[in-house]
Image (tube, rainbow, N blue to C red):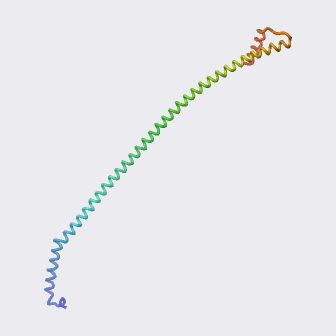
Amino acid sequence: MPQFDPTWFVSQVFWLALVLGVLYWLMSKHAIPRVQAALEARAERIKSDLDRAAKLQQDATAAAEAHAAAIAKARDEARETLRSAQAAAQAELDSRQSALAAELAQQTAEAEKRIAAARDEAMGNVREIALEAAQSITERLIGSGIESDKTAAAVDAAISQRAH
């Protein structure tokens, strides 16, 4: 084999050095700058993606905080609306209760007046019935009537004694 023949070593080393030099020069001028540019572009893209992701995360955090604040505000407004509605309903209930109480008091007073009038009428009728009964009883017992003034005074005394 010629590559193991020592006479050919010098030419082989020369060609090896020449080929390696050309490959080094080609790699340093064409291949490595392209790879380096691709790596730098990739690093730049990754950096910009990370920056954009960080900004989007900040935006999302701000949006979440704004959303939480809006929900809290809506809850507060709902509570306030509920409180005012309850207060209005309570005021309406109180006014209706007071109106009903006044109406019931008026109806009770009217009923008491009617009851008092009926009692007075009944008592007047009782007095008349008592007078007639007393006149009739005295007439039957003694055979003659008593003066109506005396009978009326006796019946009035008996009624006033029962009233007390």
- Residue 55's x, y, as percent? 30, 54
Seen in the picture, residue 155 relative to 115 is either above or below; the reply is above
Seen in the picture, residue 79 relative to 33 is either above or below; the reply is above
Residue occupying image coordinates x 46% and y 39%: 82
Along the line of sight, which residue is nearer the eye, 90 or 129? 129
Q: Is 92 placed left or right of 5 in the picture?
A: right
Residue occupying image coordinates x 17% and y 71%: 30
- Residue 3's x, y, as percent? 18, 88
Along the line of sight, which residue is nearer the eye, 164 or 143? 143
Seen in the picture, residue 133 relative to 29 is either above or below; the reply is above
Picture quadrant of residue 1: bottom left
Picture quadrant of residue 123: top right
Picture quadrant of residue 7: bottom left
Assign the C terminus to one quadrant of the image.
top right
Residue occupying image coordinates x 51% and y 34%: 90
Q: Is 163 placed left or right of 82 in the picture?
A: right
Seen in the picture, residue 99 relative to 159 is either above or below; the reply is below
- Residue 152's x, y, as percent? 76, 11
